[in-house]
Structure formats: C-alpha cells, structure tokens
Amino acid sequence: MSRLRDSAATTRAESRDGWVSVEYSSASGVTDLRLDARAMRMESARLAETILGLIHQAREHAEAEQRKRAEEFLGGNGLVTDQQVIADQLRHATGTFQENLERAAATMDRVRALLRP
C-alpha cells in the first residue's frame, strides 16, 4: 500500500481560452494555479467560477487516475484488507481538498482587491 500512496496522480485542467489552468495532485491537492494576464480582466465572479470548475475537473481526473492505479496495484481482485488505511487516506484527501478550496478563495479575494480601483 505504501508504494500506491507514494505514486500520486497529477492532472492538469485548462480553461477553453487557455487563460486559466490548474494542476492537481491526488496526494496534495492543487499544486499550481496559472492565470494569464487576460484572465485578470474577467469579472471576479466568472474568474472564481472558472477556477473552482477547473479545480473540480482536475480533482476528478486525478482521483480517477489514482483509482485506476489502485486497481492495477491490487491485481484487479478488488480485495482490500486494510480498511483503516483507506479510511485515513480518504479523510486526508477530503481535508486537503477543503484546504485548497480555502486557499483558492483567499487567492480570489486578493485578486479582487487588486482589481478594485
């Protein structure tokens, strides 16, 4: 199980216009957030919605990749004997996601403050 824990899946999601991108790791949450200068001209609500949507999309892809790796690691038999390890990992991932949402909200607040005249 430790080999599986050490091989976090990392994915990237990008807005259609390419102005905003998010990198997400199944182990540590959001690892990178990039905003093109043009994104700073978006209205704050739309920018916030875009960032949160990309975080959600990248998280889903990272979690799907991690599930795929877990299935391969377990040999496809689906038998998991250490339920406590899985429960701990799930609690950790949920906490990490919440922390990343809070960081994203704080970043959006800073961006809004910079955009105010």
Image: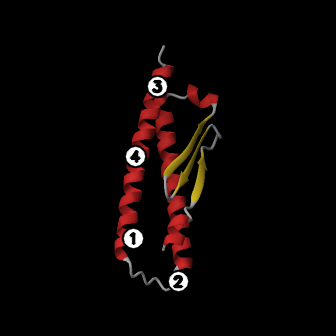
Identify residue for label 1. 86
Left or right: residue 90 compared with residue 21: left
Q: Nearer the viewer, mark 4 or mark 2?
A: 4
Q: Quadrant of residue 84?
A: bottom left
| Proximity of marks 4 and 3: CB atoms separated by less than 8 Å | no
Mark 2: few/some/many CA within 10 Å (<14, 14-19, 20+):
few
**Lower sequence index among marks 4 and 2:** 2
**Lower sequence index among marks 1 and 3:** 1
Please identify the residue farthest to the front as the structure is shown: 2
User: What is the x, y in percent for residue 17?
Assistant: 64, 40
**Lower sequence index among marks 1 and 4:** 1
> Which of the labelled discs sits on residue 76, or is there none?
2
Distance CA(mark 1)–CA(mark 2):
17 Å
User: What is the x, y in percent for residue 13?
Assistant: 59, 50
| Amino acid identity at mark 4 | Glu
**Lower sequence index among marks 2 and 3:** 2
Identify residue for label 4. 99
Q: Quadrant of residue 103?
A: top left
